[in-house]
Image (cartoon, rainbow, N blue to C red):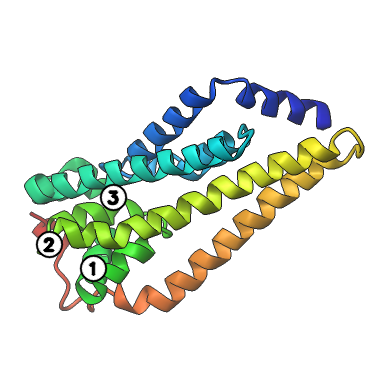
Amino acid sequence: MNDALSWILDLVQNVDPILRTILAGVGMLLETSVLIGLIVPGDTIVIVSSTGIENWAQYFALILSVIVGSLAGESIGFALGRFFGPRIRGSRLGQWVGYENWMRAENYLDRRGGIAVFVSRFLPILHSLIPLTVGMSTMRYRKFLAWTVPACAVWAIGYASVGWAAAGTYRELSGQLHYAGYIFVGIIALFLVGVYVTRKLLERSQGRHMEIPGDGDATTREDLP
């Protein structure tokens, strides 16, 4: 396992650091904009990129790139929501996302405001829908940024740190322990379990703010603009 893992990590590390950092930022831009986040795995992009970090300068550069990419993507989503929101929601793509998901995002934003912007960054599906939903709301862009910037920073630091830590630990131990690869996998797995548990706790604590009214009061799918 060590040989295969070393080959993969070396492959990532041999990519030019500037190119690797830029690609991570572009990946996050795609992940956070125009519903592409439902397809592009931003967490995987950042973890893989972070395994190639060699020093603190590259670490901070990656975090900055991820934050800037995330903010750019969310800003695009905000702008599209502001100018084309109803059309996007009523399009074939919007219908594929699902009426229930749109309503959950709308209810959550209406009931929690900026807190919904912050928390949604850590929740699947909602982190792609909230920027568009905010664009369709009365919330100002400045307020949107004030809540999403710290959320993007926390997210970026968490994922970049675990990738660097796991890869660094493996490189230190690979020459001494034949099971060092399992330590690498264990660190990543433990982090992902923590992410999963955190998401479940957030969904449980915030779920009531996303609830859709009863069927008798709810708008049907055909009522979407």
Q: Quadrant of residue 171?
A: top right
- Mark 1–mark 2 distance (CA, rounded to whole Å): 9 Å
Determine whether 14 is above or below 97 in the image.
above
Q: Quadrant of residue 88?
A: top left
> Looking at the image, which residue is at 62% across and 36% down?
55
Q: Is residue 178 visible?
A: yes
Helix, strand or loop under label 2: loop
> Looking at the image, which residue is at 54% across and 49% down?
159
Tag 1 residue: 109
Q: Position of residue 196 (x, y in %)?
A: 56, 61
Q: Position of residue 92 (x, y in %)?
A: 19, 42
Residue 143 left/right relative to 163? left
> Looking at the image, which residue is at 59% across and 40% down?
56
The quarter of the rendered structure image containing the C terminus is: bottom left
| Mark positioned earlier in the residue sequence (1 or 2) | 1
Residue 53 left/right relative to 30? right
Q: Position of residue 22 (x, y in %)?
A: 42, 29
- Mark 3–mark 2 distance (CA, rounded to whole Å): 19 Å
Determine whether 107 is above or below 123 in the image.
below
Label 3 close to label 2 by CB (< 8 Å): no
Mark 2: amino acid = Ser
- Viewer-side label of 3, 1: 1
Helix, strand or loop under label 1: helix
The quarter of the rendered structure image containing the N terminus is: top right
Q: Which mark is residue 58?
A: none
